[in-house]
Amino acid sequence: MSFITFASSPLVITPTVRSFTFSKPCRSNNTVMSAVRSESTSTCPVLTKFQKDCATPTPFLRVIANAIAGDMQAGLAVHGGGDLEMILTYVDALPSGKEEGLFYALDLGGTNFRVRSVQLGGEEERVVATKSDQLSIPQTLMIGTSEELFGFIASKLAEFVAKEEPGRFPLEQGRKREIGFTFSFPVNQTSIDSGTLIKWTKGFNVSGMQGKNVVACLNEAMEAHGLDMRVSALVNDGVGTLAGARYWDKDVMAGVILGTGTNACYVEQKNAIPKLQNKSSSSGTTIINTEWGGFSKCLPRTSFDQEMDKESLNPGEHLYEKMISGMYLGELVRRVLLHMCKTSDLFGQSVPAKLATPLALKSQDLCKIQEDNTDDLSSVGSILYNIFEIKADLKARRRVVDVCDTVVKRGGRLAGAGIVAILERIERETKRMASGQRTVVAMDGALYEKYPQYRQYMQDALVELLGHDLASHVEIKHTKDVSGLGAALLAATNSIY
Ligand code: BGC
C-alpha cells in the first residue's frame, strides 16, 4: 500500500516536516479529499477539449520522462546540448557534519528575501543557534535596476548583522564573515563563489543584469553599505536544499523545488559528465543544477498555455516551469474561465470585469477550491465572489472545480515525470535502489507543501512510472526552508580561512 507519513522534527531546525515513502505493493489510495465534479463536463465543449488536451496518461508521461532524461544527457555532454542547462555547480563536497563557526545565508529567488545566521558546532552539536529575517521583495524591485535590487538586499543584510551577537564565534582579526548566497535563477557558474546570470525567471526582469556576475553586484552593494563580508558560496535553492537536507540524512541524492518556480538538482558521478572531461578531476561526485524549468519538448501545451507564455516576462522560456509551478497554475485557470465566459454563459450573460485581471487567481485559491467538500460548493462560491465579484450558481462552481483539477492534475503529474527522470538517472549511475538502498529526494516549495491534491497527483505519477519495486526505496522528504542552512554549510565547506 502506498502511504504518506507525517513526521515532525525533534531538533530546532531539523528540516523534515512531512515526507512520504512508497512501500509495495502499491494500490491507488487517494486519501486526499478533492472536489471533483466530473458530471458537469459533458455539457461544456471548451472544458471537455481542455481536459482532453491536458491529459497525461501513463504512456505519455513515460515519453516525457524519457525526453527529460534525453535532454539531461545532452546537456551533460555539451554546454547548450539540450533544453536543460545541466549547470556544473562546483559543489563537489557536500556537508559532512563537522562544519564549525558562524556563517550567514542570503536567499533571493522568489517573492521573499531571507537572511539567516547559523552557528555551527561541529559533529557533536550540529546547529547551535540560528536566526532569520524574511521580507517580501517589493514588486518594483523585481523589474527595476540591479543597483536598486542589490542595494535593498545589502541594506537588509546590514540591518540584520547590526542586531547580531557573535555568540561563541567572535570574528578573528583580519577575517571577514562569510556568506552562502542562494540566488535562485539560472546562473552560469564559473566557480563556487561566482557566476553570471543567464536569464531571469518567475516575474523578475531587472535590467542590464544578463551576463553579469551576481556576486560582484552583491559585493559592490555590500561595500556601499559598509559591510565587510565575503560570499564564499553562490548556490541555487535546489543545491541549498540538497546540501541542507544531506546534513541530516546521508541518503539525500536530489533537491527539488516546487514553489513559485521549479528546479531539480542531484548528485552526479563526475565520470558520467562528458563536458567535464577536460577539467582537473573526473572522479567522485558533483552536484548538477538541471534548471529543468527550461524543458520544452512534447509537453501537452494548450492555446491557453501559449497565450500565457506570450504575455509573460520571459516568452518562449521555462515552458515546463509554466505548466508545473505555483506562479502559473492560477493564472492558467483564470484564462480558461475567461474564455469559457466569453464563449458560453458560465457566469451569466456578461463577462465579469475582474476576471480579466492577470494573475488575480493564485495557486492557494485553487487549493481552497479543490478542498471544498460541501454539497453546494459554498467556499468555491465565496472565493469566486471575493476575488472576481462573481455570483456563480452550482453548475458554474462545478465547472470551476473541474478546470482547477485539470490544471493541477497535469502540473502534479508532469512534476512526477521530472522526478522520475532524475531518479532513473541516479539509478543508472549508482544502482542504489536496485540494491535496496533508500534514496531520498529533498523537497521544498510552498506548492508542494500546501497543496495536497498536487502532491497526490505527483506521487501517483511517480509510482506509475517507476514501478512499485523501485518506488518502494524512494522517499520524498519535505525539507522546509532548508536551503538557507545548506547555503551557510556550503559557505563553511568553502571557507577561505
Ligand atoms: C529558476 C531556478 C530556481 C527555481 C526555483 C526557477 O525559475 O530558474 O534557478 O531554482 O525557479 O526557485
Image (tube, grey):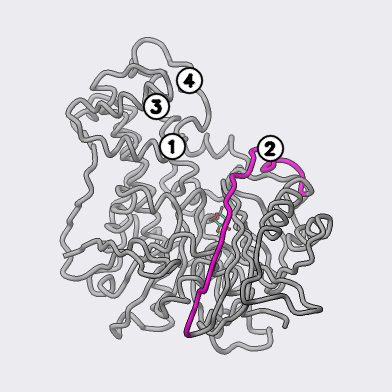
Helix, strand, or loop for circle 4? helix
Label 1: state its secondary structure.
Answer: helix
Nearer the N terminus, badge 4 or badge 2? Answer: 2
In the image, what residue occupies the spot 63% across and 40% down? 313
The residue that mark 1 highlights is 330
User: In the rendered structure, which segment of residues is drawn in magenta?
Assistant: 124-146
Q: Is residue 427 magenta?
A: no
The label number, if any, that marks residue 337 in the structure image: 3
In front of the other: 399 or 152: 152
Confirm whether residue 90 shows in the render: no
Residue 168 lies, in percent from the top left, at 62, 76
Picture coordinates of residue 185 (x, y %)? Answer: 62, 56
Q: Is residue 378 above or below residue 118?
A: above
Kind of residue at badge 1? Gly
Q: Position of residue 373 (x, y in %)?
A: 21, 35
Separation of residues labelled 4 and 3 (CA atoms): 12 Å
Q: Is residue 463 visible?
A: yes
Question: Mark 3 or 2 closer to N-term?
Answer: 2
Q: Nearer the viewer, mark 2 or mark 1?
A: 2
Q: Is residue 444 above or below residue 452?
A: below
274 w.r.t. 82: above or below: below
Mark 3 surroundings: few (<14), some (14-19) or many (≥20) residues within 10 A: many
Q: Nearer the viewer, mark 4 or mark 3?
A: 4
- Quick one: label 4 or label 3, which is nearer the N terminus? 3
* Earlier-in-chain disc, 2 versus 1: 2
Give the residue at mark 2: 140
User: Between residues 158 and 413, which one lies in front from this camera angle?
Assistant: 158
